[in-house]
Image (cartoon, helix red, strand yellow):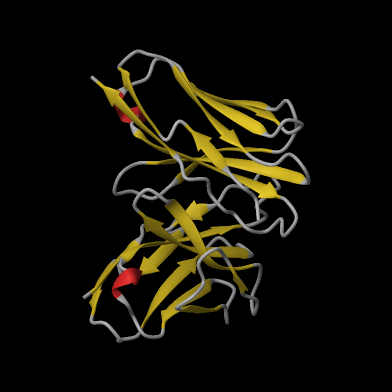
Amino acid sequence: NAGVTQTPKFRVLKTGQSMTLLCAQDMNHEYMYWYRQDPGMGLRLIHYSVGEGTTAKGEVPDGYNVSRLKKQNFLLGLESAAPSQTSVYFCASTSLPGMNTEAFFGQGTRLTVV
Amino acid sequence: ILNVEQSPQSLHVQEGDSTNFTCSFPSSNFYALHWYRWETAKSPEALFVMTLNGDEKKKGRISATLNTKEGYSYLYIKGSQPEDSATYLCAPLGGSISYDKVIFGPGTSLSVIP
C-alpha cells in the first residue's frame, strides 16, 4: 500500500521562484493537511482540507496556497519562494480526526530556498 | 485556537529507566487527543488516539492516560530503550474554533543513552 506519497522529495529553489508540492493518498481519506517542520517549533499547520473542493487556513498560511480538486490529491503552492520558506514539508491525511482515526504522514519534502 | 503545552521540552534518560511526559490543553470543548512518535529524518507515526476521560491506552512499553476535565494527558515509557529516542508530539482536537484541525504541541524530545 502506498499510503501518503509526496512529490518531490527534495527541491532547491531560487528566491522568487514558484513551485507546487503534490500530496497523494490512496486511502480515500476526507481530511488532508500540510505542515512545515521548523527547529524548536515542531510541526506547524499551513493549510488543510476537510474534503474535495475545500481548503482552510492553518497556523502559518502566509506565502502558500493550496488546492484540493481531487479527493486523493492536495497541492501546496509557493507563489514566490523566500528563504524563510526553507523547511521540511509534511503532508498528512485522515478519515475523521476525532473518531479514533489517526493521521498518516508522507515521507516529507525537503525544500531549500537560496 | 488551542494552547497546547508539552513538558519537558527535552529529556535524557539512561537505557532501562522509565519516563513520562505531559501534554496540557484547555479542557473546554475537548474532542480527541492524538499522540505521535517522530524519529529523526522520518515521518511522524501515530501512537494513540484518545477520546474519553479516563482513557488508558497501551502499545508495548508505551502507555498513555487522558484527563479531559483537567486538560492533560501523560505518556509513559517503561524501561526505555535507545530505539525509543524520538520526539513525542500531542495534538488535542477541540476548542473554540474547529474540530478538524490537527495542530501539534511543540513536542518532547527524548534521548535514551545506552
Which residue is found at the position 57% from the left and 82% from the top?
A: A69
Observer-nearest of A85 and B18: A85
Percent across and percent down for residue A5 are 41, 64
Vertical order, A93 against B69 (above or below): below
User: How many discs mark residues in the rendered view?
Assistant: 0
Q: Image quarter for residue A12? A: bottom left
Q: Nearer the viewer, residue A78 or A75?
A: A78
Q: Residue at x 45, y 16 (%)?
A: B78
Q: In this image, A36 relative to B83: left or right? A: right
Residue B8 is situated, as x and y percent measured from the top left of the image, at 45, 30
Q: Quadrant of residue A37?
A: bottom left
Residue lying at 25% horizontally and 22% vertically, measured from the top left = B113
Q: Is residue A109 left or right of residue B114?
A: right
Q: Position of residue B60 (x, y in %)?
A: 48, 23
**Residue A4 image offset from top left, x and y in percent:** 45, 61
Foreground residue among A25 and A9: A9
